[in-house]
Image (spheres, grey):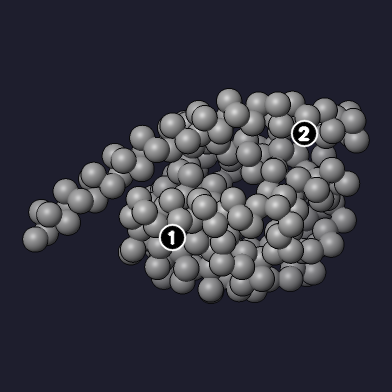
């Protein structure tokens, strides 16, 4: 019985990786024109800053990697963060602020539609991330994790996940962790497809993305 479970897990992980490569490759090719338009809009609003933003995140088993996004904030956003921490609108080891003054005009749009997340397809191709999985946390967030919270790091993080399609920023940190751990215990290829389908449905016009 144990061997069967191990074999099933190996099959799932192999299938998941194949789908990640195919999905990320297809997504990059299909959305290449969107990438170009977003890059032009970002540069049009702020020529001094880069188009892409990379940030150190914590992946599977605590491994650090750089996650890529379209830049949605002013260039010195990280330096300004310390002055905003007391205005955090979500409990636990995360920072969320609905009216974050660091976000640019185009940044608000690409965040609202989650288009800022598209460059993470490159992270998927590299193997740092999967299409579906827990959100990759920041190092400073992991420093505040309990042993229970650290179970989120047992699997490869994802571009989208059960938390994102279940309320996202409207949920507390504890609720996010519980959803992630439920996913880790129950995950299957079918479950991944369902989460991707739900992600597409809530991608545009979601009030929970900030």
Q: Which quadrant of the figure has residue 66?
A: top right
Vertical position of residue 103 compared to residue 95: above or below: above
Q: Is 104 left, or right, of 56 in this rendering?
A: right
x 70%, y 52%: residue: 204
Q: Quadrant of the N terminus?
A: bottom left
Of the pair 167 and 139, the residue shown nearer to us: 167
Question: Residue at coordinates 82% horizontally, 39% vertically from top-left?
Answer: 75
Q: Which residue was labeled with disc 1?
A: 152
140 left or right of 79? left
Looking at the picture, how far across and down is residue 8, in whole percent?
20, 51
Distance of label 2 from label 1 (alpha carbons) = 32 Å
The answer to which of marks 2 and 1 sits earlier in the sequence is 2
Q: Is residue 105 above or below residue 81?
A: above
Give the labeled residue for mark 2: 38
- What SS does tag 2 mark? helix
Image x and y of residue 121, in percent: 55, 36
**14 left or right, relative to 155:** left
Query: Between 153 and 181, which is closer to the camera in this rendering?
Result: 181
Q: Is residue 137 visible?
A: no
Q: Position of residue 80 (x, y in %)?
A: 82, 52
Q: Secondary structure at mark 1?
A: helix
Mark in the foreground, 2 or 1: 2
Q: Is residue 196 visible?
A: yes
Q: Residue at x 52, y 30 (%)?
A: 26
């Amino acid at each position: 019985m144990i061997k069967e479970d191990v074999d099933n897990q190996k099959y799932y992980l192999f299938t998941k990786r194949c789908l990640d490569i195919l999905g990320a490759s297809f997504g990059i090719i299909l959305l290449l024109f969107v990438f170009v338009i977003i890059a032009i809009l970002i540069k049009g609003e702020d020529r001094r800053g880069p188009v892409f933003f990379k940030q150190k995140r914590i992946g599977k088993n605590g491994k650090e990697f750089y996650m890529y996004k379209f830049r949605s904030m002013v260039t010195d956003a990280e330096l300004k963060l310390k002055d905003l921490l007391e205005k955090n609108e979500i409990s636990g080891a995360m920072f969320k602020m609905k009216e974050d003054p660091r976000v640019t005009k185009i940044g608000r749009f690409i965040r609202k539609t989650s288009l800022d997340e598209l460059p993470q397809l490159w992270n998927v191709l590299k193997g740092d991330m999967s299409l579906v999985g827990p959100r990759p946390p920041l190092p400073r967030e992991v420093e505040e994790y309990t042993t229970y919270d650290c179970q989120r790091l047992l699997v490869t993080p994802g571009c989208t996940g059960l938390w994102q399609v279940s309320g996202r920023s409207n949920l507390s940190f504890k609720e996010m962790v519980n959803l992630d751990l439920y996913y880790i215990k129950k995950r299957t290829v079918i479950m991944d497809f369902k989460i991707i389908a739900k992600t597409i449905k809530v991608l545009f016009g979601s009030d929970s993305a900030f």
